[in-house]
Image (spheres, helix red, strand yellow):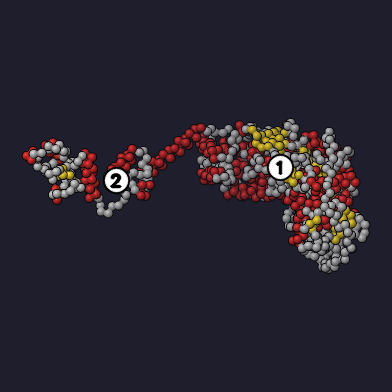
Amino acid sequence: MSEHRRKPPQPQGGGRAAARRGQSGSSSGRRAAPRGATESPSDSQGTSSLGSGSYDSGGEERPYGGRAEARRAAQRSAGGRRRAAEPAGRGGRRGPGGPNGPGRGRSAASSRNRIIDYPRAGKYGWRRWMPSWKLVSGLCIGFVGSLVAVAGIGYAMVSVPNVAETAEAQNNVFYWADGSEMVATGGETNRQMVNLAQIPKAMQNAVISQENKTFETDNGIDPKGIARAVFNMASGGETQGGSTITQQYVKNAMLDDQSQTVSRKFKEIFVSIKVGTTMSKDKIMEGYLNSAYYGRGAYGIQAAARAYFNKDAVDLNEGECAFLAATLKGATYYDPAGSESIDPTGATPAANQKRALVQMQDTLDKMVEYGHLSPTTRAKYKTLPDWKNPRSNNELSGQVGYLVDLAKAYLINNNIVSADKVQQGGLSIYTTFDKKKVNELETAVQKVQKAKIDPKKRPKTDKYVQFGGASVDPATGAIKAIYGGEDATKHFTNNADATGAQVGSTFKPLVLAAAMKWGVRDPDLEPNQAQDERTKVSAKSLYSGKNDLKIKNYDGTIWKNEKGKEWLQENDGKQSYGSPPNYQIDLREAMRESVNSAYVQLGMDVGLDKVKESAMDAGLKESSLAGTSFPSFSIGISDPSAIRMAGAYATFAASGKQREPFSVQKVTDKDGLVFTHKVATKTAFEPIVADNVTDVLKTVVEDGTGTNAQLPGREVAGKTGTTDGNKSAWFVGYTTQLATSISMFRMDDDETRKNREFLEMYGTGGEKEIHGASFPSQIWRDYMQQALKGEPAEPFPTPEPIGEVVNDVPSPTPTPTPTPTITETPSATPTPSETATSPSPTPTESCQFDWQCTGDQTGGTDTGGTDGGTSPSPSVTETDGNGNTRGNGNGGLFGGSTG
């Protein structure tokens, strides 16, 4: 290219237009550098092509080689200027092109396009994750707004409940085993609405003082209580009711939904708020007192006043009002009549009366404190008011009330249905009770009562006589029939359940079963070895039938209590069995004649711990068993219920298969099936053990103390039992199809009195003494004849030989063991009832009392009736040998409550 056409270099800073003009004038057509592209004088003097510009062949600098390169140069130049303006030392992570390069530019643009700037654009490190105040404020406003919206919707959707509608509470319908209806009970007459004017002001003040002292001024809800209840439910903890009267009223009125869920609790809150804003306090109080549950099936104050005091609500005094306010805490534990069918140990009459009195007094004190009651009036009420016994529903008369209570207790105690759900009703409960058998058992008892028991003619001996009974199917454990007492509306304790009556010699088959299952210990071995090295016994094993037998430990040493006293076991009538000098008889004969001495010693040889274990294997509850510290444990000082005794013998009838007694087959509600029973079977004894026990018990009925229980054409096995002092008598027996127990005892029928005691039955029914062989076996026979009518006669299984003959070699007469001199003063002269069964003590005689020997009792022997008595029956509050309280309420189907 010619020299004269090349233009000189353009001055710096001429701008983009100047660059274009200069470029257009160039023969090469190259574009000028962008604005701001500069170079130092040194760069123009022979720099290489690696510099910011490029050069042509003549050595002159050429502007940028293209548009992209020029753009990048401009960006680098702008970045340099910005960095120069930043404070020195500014750190932080930089994107491409520097902190203000293209990465930061894109981030800033992106932040402007997002609704929520989080994580925060243009921020680095922890600042990127720290929300801005705008974001926090916005979220809070949104959350509060959402809550307001939800609350508004919830408030609009709920309605104020009408308590009058809940007066139509649903019944629970109970059915017989064949599906026919037994009774509908629970809601038919359980509430009568009354106006607030008919409710004493004292009743209103009592619930305000005890339940919600701010009722008159609060808005109807307790935020703290609500939060606590919601948290407990959400975390699976214990549920809680409403903490204000308004909330409790709403809860009572919402019978359509009684579930304990978080959603229901929120619904209850909205309803409570609406009630608090739309209803007057008087209407809320009226609704609450008319809907609350006071126990005894009574919903509402009017029904409660009738149930407890047989008067109208308007006539209640201050003390009665305070008492009814106490029942609102939970009628199960505040009804002074007790609720033993639900909780046999914690809801006894004595325990409930104590709780109710404390709560009543606390309510009265608060009424005085809050100015609702004068101290003078309060001073009038120091004891519980005169309450009436429960149950007046004629449909629950006879045995039906006992059956209903039994079925309800089974459901509640097995956590099948809650007590609240049972009270609310709406359940169809299909029981195991056979209507025909129930009626036949009642008829059999009434036959003996009418023929033999005459309280008017013999008030001293025939008054307070009671019977109990139960019948169990060995194949399933189903309770087919019970006899709970004369009338469930008059006699409130279910005698088929735990009564505290000792079972006497009906316990001996369990000792024999233990001996055949576990065996006796070897007296020549150390205790640890003896537990493992055992000899299973045959019914042909020989034991002493001597009266006043000195009981030994398994190793041959004389048994002594902690005071050094020995034990002489007395037989009924002080009779010895077998030939002298050793008086040995086999275990079959000892069972047939109910010889106490033989079975007490057998129990010691086996070990009373193993006897107890066998009893529990058969189905008895541990809580019904006495302590094993004394030899008399083997002859029935324990007090299982009639149901449990029938169930234990049913285990023998089923060749050792144990099935828990139960009283409910299935439960349904409006939504369908709630529960169905499944038979669970466990092996308590091997068939060889159970069938050999049965074979021995057959001889008791065929040719022993139980001959009154014979059923023509049928094989029967059973055992009689009588306790010392004639305070209780039993017969328990079975065929292959049915096991039945019958008990008889005397006890003061005043169930409100503390420390009720069993009474002697000498002369009862015109008999000199009462034994299991008399009235109980007669009732058993009359019932079983009818109950098994039409059923085929089935023989018992033929038992296989078992065990060895223990003590088959007669031992020499033992040398008397010197006994320490007893220094205690002999007991006082026995009362007439004592002299009928026990000889006068001598200074060196051994201790023979039920479960403990006291310092002023230096002798006496364990005695029995004609079918094998035991030690004296205790009152229902005595203690066993371990110091544990025993008695009424410990031997039912579920540790006291029956099923």
- Give whichever of 761, 517 is nearer the camera: 517
Looking at the rendering, which quadrant does residue 400 occupy? top right
Q: Residue at x 59, y 48 (%)?
A: 366
Looking at the rendering, which quadrant does residue 67 occupy? top left
Looking at the rendering, which quadrant does residue 835 occupy? bottom right
- The residue where tag 2 is placed is 96
Q: Are marks 1 and 2 in contact (CB under 8 Å)?
A: no
Whether residue 895 sits left or right of residue 364 in the image: it is right
Neighbours of disc 2 within 10 Å: few (<14), some (14-19), many (20+)? few
Neighbours of disc 1 within 10 Å: few (<14), some (14-19), many (20+)? few
Q: Which residue type does callout 2 highlight?
A: Pro
Whether residue 47 sits left or right of residue 179 in the image: it is left
Report the residue that reaches farthest toward the left.
Answer: 4
Q: Which residue type does callout 1 highlight?
A: Ala
Residue 566 visible in this rendered orientation of the protein: no
Q: Residue at x 28, y 43 (%)?
A: 102
Spot occupied by residue 613 in the image (x, y as percentages of width and height): 75, 52
Residue 662 visible in this rendered orientation of the protein: yes
Spot occupied by residue 581 in the image (x, y as percentages of width and height): 92, 60
Spot occupied by residue 326 in the image (x, y as percentages of width and height): 64, 45
* Label 2: element kind: loop
Spot occupied by residue 159 in the image (x, y as percentages of width and height): 53, 32
- The residue where tag 1 is placed is 680
Label 1, label 2: how many angstroms apart (C-alpha)?
76 Å
Report the residue that reaches farthest toward the right.
Answer: 579
Image quarter where the C terminus lies is top right
